[in-house]
């Protein structure tokens, strides 16, 4: 019996007669090629099943990995060490849930060093790609591979963006014994799950600060990465390991002119939206946008909504408030978050603050982050690139000028300021325009900060 | 290349009908191209803003968005800046962080150091951003017709990007399709053959387990090749608006075709054909004869050799490049399954990828660099 990795799946040929494969994990008959086939992520379950039945098979070296060497001790805090043991005890298959800023990457490094398995780390963005490579290089002496940003270099330890993993896992899926998934909550809802399904890795570690809570999503995630094996909430670590922080919400107004324009736009939108909701109370926002695309009136409503959002992104009062805040905190390291790139550039021009956006190349981004760390730049402004775990140490003040973002992103933005330094108390300003859609958005965002269910130790 | 273009289609029952651009769209396409030409030398964002405004005559919203994206994808912008933007940013933002005397003073200090004006320096800061790049001319002028065909190709591929699998009913040119599919990691099976028609099912390995659009990009790559089939019909199941709908394409759909297929795969084949014809004037040499069905697979011999006066004397010939004994064994099994007996395999001795001897029971001509036409002629008599 032969097991062979075939483009993200395992092909099983020469099945001994008399062996009933009906219950074998993941295995189905593929009439297209006249052989049995299983998704690659079932590999360890499948081989275990075969071994339990005393079936001999030739996997042609699949799953036999040359151990990685040269790891230095990443040095774990006690809760990080506990998380790692919990994962080991769970059979190296599961999720570790820790607040942003608590050093999830460090646990990943420790997992790679402890298992010495060739490892593939999946990260959501190109910026994180570089950051992970950089982190790994501090404890691992060899070249770190890279998939993403147009590069395709595989090495025993490799970092890949989700996007390139989705596109190339059918070719590289057999090489890694350990799969580490950063911000793992992005998976398990059907979008790009194939990236995880096409990997052979029998050891899997998912990391997140904001795990999904609905059963369908959790169940799916448990299937392809594993169940939650360790969880700490922000309250468990604040003060002791994380800097504490205060959130100050500043309510700002629109100018008369802006208000008139906003009311007009908002009116155009609500008329169409209310009519739609009246007809279809169960419909979602996506349904609305789709339905709106079909009529000129609907398209105008959506356009009005977008225009209103653009207007709110950076109003006159927000600009004035930001100026005052920058003056007040002229000695602090400040991160400014905007709703869109255009606002980021406007602020960049107005205050001569370096913007970090997707348009800024990787090399320049790295240089900018270095300059910020060393104090040569005291502020950065960004819409998207600073999201999700990008390691910007020692920021003291964050200003959220605008954001259409969900709870998760907000938590992560604030988390950015929580990198531990002794005695630090971070300050987060949130600018919210009165009597606009920003008020309810801000309220929804703040729900994400409510202390979560505590650890499952 | 990005497949992310605005989708312009309508749903009729369970079928998605792409809104292809046709001759009726040429007037507004022409206006759009003229507007673009008028803004050559201006920043991209001005063109974007202009194209958001109505044209006269104007195109339908969905089609227009599609065309604007296709135009943007064709590129053609350059950068115009007095100071390289990266250098400008590094100097200006660094200086601003050091100085406490305000924005304009910081700009002026850096500008004088670079011997440019403050305005020039400020204009350079983000001159490399997509919106700030300068619109330039298309080399050879782009006609409304070509633009429409390109937009239709982009639209079709974007729809197929959401496809879980396709069924192809083709006449002729199946070889290029099967080859493209294989190169893209897809699995091709033959579900039916009637007359000159071949029905192919194309999907990816993982599609066995779940409905996936993982292979959409690869499936989209087949589209430009379809135009070279003398007749084709494509049916794809696409995931649109959270349900599965059918997309049908057929001969004559206005889609930009791929470059014409090359008559010979390699000089090796060309040379063999030439030498064999010279050596054996009684034989006809057909390149890429009809594919042969073996079970649910298609096999593509490179040549059919047919004696001109004796219909019973017919041989198939395949030239094998890189090979392993296992590969040759499977290939022979396919021909056997298809009940082909008069088969000659020409095997490149220099390209064996594995140890081991060749399976027996095949007529094999070994070669290095060139296939010996004389040796083949001896076999066919």
Image (cartoon, coloured by chain):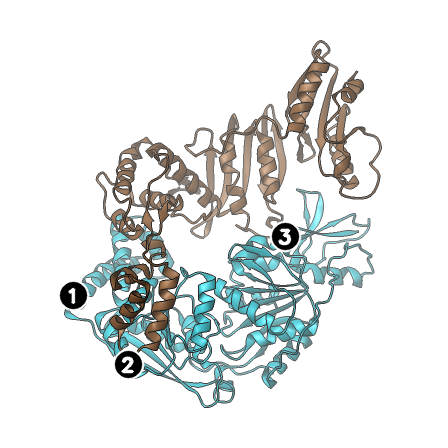
Chain colours: A cyan, B brown
Q: Residue at x 18, y 62 (%)?
A: A264
* Residue A403 visible in the picture: no
Image mark for residue B122 = none
Residue A246, x across and y down, in percent: 38, 85
How far, Cα to Cα, is label 1 from label 2?
30 Å
Task: Please rate how many residues cluster around mark 3, counting C-alpha atoms within 10 Å: few if below 14, some from 14 to 19, many from 20.
Answer: some
- Please report whichever mark, 3 or 1, sits nearer to the chain's N-terminal start: 3
Estimate the spatial distance between the alpha carbons at disc 3 and disc 2, rounded to whole Å. Answer: 53 Å
Q: Which residue corresponds to mark 3?
A: A171
Q: Residue at x 69, y 23 (%)?
A: B272
Q: Which residue is mark 2?
A: A327
Label 2: element kind: helix
Residue B50 vs B84, above or below: the answer is: above
Q: Position of residue A195 (x, y in %)?
A: 57, 58
- In front of the other: B83 or A371: B83
Tell me which corner region of the image, top left, top right, bottom left or bottom right, holds residue B117. bottom left
Name, please, the residue furthest toward the top. B309
The label on residue A260 is: 1
Q: Is there a contact, CB below 8 Å, between mark 3 and mark 1? A: no
Along the line of sight, the residue nearer the viewer: B336 or A374:
A374
Query: At which x and y percent is residue A7?
Result: 64, 50
Q: Chain of mark 2?
A: A
């Amino acid at each position: 019996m032969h097991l062979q990795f075939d483009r993200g799946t395992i092909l099983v040929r020469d099945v001994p007669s008399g062996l009933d494969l009906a219950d074998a994990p993941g295995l189905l008959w593929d009439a297209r090629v006249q052989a049995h086939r299983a998704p690659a992520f079932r590999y360890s379950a499948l081989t275990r099943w075969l071994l339990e039945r005393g079936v001999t098979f030739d996997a042609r070296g699949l799953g036999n990995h040359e151990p990685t060497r040269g790891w230095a001790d990443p040095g774990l805090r006690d809760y990080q060490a506990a998380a790692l043991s919990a994962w080991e005890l769970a059979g190296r298959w599961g999720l570790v849930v820790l607040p942003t800023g608590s050093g999830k990457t460090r646990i990943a490094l420790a997992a790679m060093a402890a298992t010495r398995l060739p490892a593939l780390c999946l990260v959501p963005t190109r910026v994180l790609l570089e950051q992970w490579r950089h982190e790994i290089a501090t404890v691992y002496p060899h070249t770190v591979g890279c998939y993403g940003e147009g590069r395709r270099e595989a090495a025993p330890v490799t970092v890949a963006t989700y996007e390139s993993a989705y596109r190339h896992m059918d070719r590289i899926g057999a090489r890694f014994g350990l799969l580490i998934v950063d911000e793992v909550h992005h998976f398990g809802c059907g979008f790009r799950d194939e990236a995880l399904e096409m990997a052979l890795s029998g050891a899997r570690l998912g990391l997140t600060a904001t795990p999904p809570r609905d059963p369908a999503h959790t169940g799916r995630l448990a299937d392809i990465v594993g169940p939650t094996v360790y969880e700490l909430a922000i309250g468990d670590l604040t003060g002791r390991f994380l800097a504490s922080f205060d959130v100050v919400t500043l309510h700002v107004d629109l100018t008369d002119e802006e208000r008139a324009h906003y009311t007009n736009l908002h009116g155009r939108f609500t008329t169409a939206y209310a009519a739609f909701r009246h007809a279809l109370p169960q419909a979602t926002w996506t349904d609305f946008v789709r339905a709106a695309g079909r009529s000129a009136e609907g398209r105008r409503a959506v356009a009005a909504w977008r225009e209103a959002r653009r207007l709110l992104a950076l109003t006159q009062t927000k600009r004035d408030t930001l100026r005052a805040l920058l003056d007040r905190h002229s000695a602090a390291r400040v991160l400014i978050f905007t709703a869109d790139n255009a606002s980021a550039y406007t602020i960049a021009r107005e205050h001569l603050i370096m913007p970090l956006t997707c348009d800024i190349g990787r090399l320049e981004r790295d240089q900018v982050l270095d300059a910020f760390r060393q104090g040569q730049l005291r502020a950065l402004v960004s819409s998207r690139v600073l999201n999700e775990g990008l390691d910007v140490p020692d920021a003291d003040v964050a200003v959220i000028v605008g954001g259409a973002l969900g709870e998760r992103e907000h938590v992560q933005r604030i988390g950015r300021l929580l990198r531990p330094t002794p005695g630090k108390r971070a300050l987060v300003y949130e600018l919210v325009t009165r009597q606009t859609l920003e008020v309810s958005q801000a309220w929804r965002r703040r729900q994400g900060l409510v202390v979560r269910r505590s650890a499952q130790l | 290349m990005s497949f992310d273009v605005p989708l312009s289609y309508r749903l009729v029952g369970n079928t998605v009908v792409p809104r292809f651009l046709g001759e009726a769209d040429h007037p507004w396409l022409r206006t759009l191209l003229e507007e673009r030409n008028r803004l050559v030398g201006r920043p991209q964002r001005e063109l974007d803003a202009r194209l958001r405004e109505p044209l006269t005559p104007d195109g339908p919203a969905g089609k227009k968005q599609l065309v604007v994206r296709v135009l943007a994808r064709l590129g053609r912008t350059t950068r115009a800046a007095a100071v390289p933007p990266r250098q400008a940013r590094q100097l200006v933002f660094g200086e601003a962080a050091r100085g406490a005397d305000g924005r304009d003073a910081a700009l002026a200090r850096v500008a004088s150091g670079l011997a440019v004006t403050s305005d020039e320096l400020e204009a350079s800061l983000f001159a490399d951003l997509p919106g700030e790049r300068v619109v330039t001319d298309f080399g050879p002028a782009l006609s409304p017709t070509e633009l429409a065909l390109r937009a239709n190709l982009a639209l079709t591929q974007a729809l197929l990007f959401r496809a879980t699998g396709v069924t192809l009913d083709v006449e002729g040119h199946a070889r290029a399709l099967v080859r493209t599919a294989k190169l893209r990691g897809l699995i091709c099976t033959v579900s039916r053959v009637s007359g000159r028609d071949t029905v192919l099912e194309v999907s990816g390995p993982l599609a066995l387990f779940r409905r996936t659009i993982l292979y959409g990009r690869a499936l989209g790559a087949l589209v430009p090749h379809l135009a070279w089939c003398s007749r084709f019909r494509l049916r794809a199941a696409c995931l649109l608006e959270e349900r599965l709908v059918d997309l049908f394409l057929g001969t004559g759909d206005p889609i930009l075709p791929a470059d014409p297929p090359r008559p010979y795969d390699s000089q090796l084949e060309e040379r063999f054909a030439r030498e064999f014809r010279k050596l054996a004037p009684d034989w006809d040499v057909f390149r890429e004869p009809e594919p042969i069905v073996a079970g649910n697979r298609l096999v593509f011999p490179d040549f059919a050799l047919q004696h001109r006066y004796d219909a019973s004397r017919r041989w198939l010939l395949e030239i094998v490049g890189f090979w392993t004994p296992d590969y040759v064994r499977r290939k022979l099994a396919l021909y056997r399954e298809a009940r082909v007996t008069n088969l000659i395999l020409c095997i490149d001795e220099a390209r064996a990828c594995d140890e081991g001897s060749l399976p027996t029971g095949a007529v094999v001509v070994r070669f290095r660099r060139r296939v010996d036409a004389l040796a083949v002629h001896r076999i066919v008599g």
